[in-house]
Image (cartoon, helix red, strand yellow):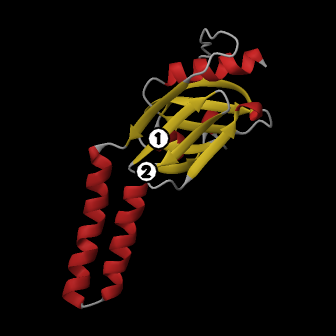
């Protein structure tokens, strides 16, 4: 992918933050899954199905959006509930790239995922939709990905800090 580099002065402080959210089709999928469970639970009086539906809705809410923050010390990606969370120190990052991600093809779905095929195989992160993503390549070769608007600015800031080291 592209490796932009932002222009930063020595010691210049910055914070870049964006919220990445799922699409309405993801919410519809969760509703389509939870509503029949509740109806069947009500008709059959199986209370366990209500619990399963509630867990499904809670997981969907936790994965609905993430906050991505980049500063001189680290890159943090955290869900709306604060967990799950990924924090990568700048010292651990080799470089950042901007890549195009297809959620279903590359990661097999949406949410906190691990790449299953192609060039993203083995990378982990938050894939809430398809599109432009920030890909962090760590010094140990591991990759962390998040699909977020303006990924080029985030990658440029990360690369500027990495080049200055």
Residue under label 1: 67
Q: Are marks 1 and 2 in contact (CB under 8 Å)?
A: yes
- Which x, y percent locates residue 111? 47, 50
| Neighbours of disc 1 within 10 Å: few (<14), some (14-19), many (20+) | some
First in sequence, mark 1 or 2: give its number. 1
Please state the total of marks drawn on the protein image: 2
Residue at 55 percent across and 49 percent down: it is: 113
Locate the N terminus and report the quarter of the image it occupies: top right
Residue at point 64%, 25% (across, down): 96
Image point 69% across, 20% down: which residue? Answer: 161
| Residue 108 visible in rendering | no
Residue 76 occupies quadrant: top right
Using the rendered image of the protein, determine whether residue 155 is visible from the camera's viewpoint.
yes
- Res 71 → quadrant: top right
21 sits left or right of 7 in the view: left
SS under mark 1: strand
Q: Position of residue 105 (x, y in %)?
A: 49, 40
Mark number displayed over residue 7: none
- Quarter of the C terminus within the rendering: top right
Instruction: Categorize mark 2 by other alpha carbons within 10 Å: few (<14), some (14-19), many (20+).
Output: some
SS of the residue at dot 2? loop
Vertical comparison of 120 with 61: above or below: above
Residue placed farthest to the bottom in the image?
A: 45
**Residue on which the image places disc 2:** 80
In the visual, does 65 lie left or right of 27? right
State the image coordinates of residue 32 (x, y, percent, origin top left): 25, 62
Image position, residue 81 (x, y; %): 45, 55
**In this picture, residue 136 sits left or right of residue 42:** right
Residues under labels 1 and 2: Cα distance? 7 Å
Classify 2 as above or below 59.
above
- In-front residue for pair 94/49: 94
Residue in view at x 33 percent, y 81 percent: 49
């Amino acid at each position: 992918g592209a490796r932009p580099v932002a222009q930063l002065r020595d010691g210049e402080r910055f914070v870049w933050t964006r919220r990445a959210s799922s699409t309405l089709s993801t919410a519809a999928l969760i509703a389509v899954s939870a509503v029949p469970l509740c109806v069947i639970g009500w008709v059959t009086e199986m209370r366990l199905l209500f619990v399963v539906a509630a867990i499904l809705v809670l997981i969907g809410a936790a994965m609905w959006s993430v906050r991505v923050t980049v500063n001189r010390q680290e890159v943090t990606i955290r869900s709306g509930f604060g967990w799950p969370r990924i924090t990568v120190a700048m010292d651990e990052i080799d470089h950042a790239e901007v890549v195009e991600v297809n959620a279903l093809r590359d990661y097999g779905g949406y949410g906190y995922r691990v790449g299953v095929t192609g060039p993203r195989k083995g990378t982990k992160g938050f894939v809430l939709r398809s599109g432009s993503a920030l890909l962090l390549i760590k010094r140990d070769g591991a990759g962390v990905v998040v699909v977020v608007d303006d990924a080029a600015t985030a990658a440029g800031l990360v690369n500027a800090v990495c080049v200055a080291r």
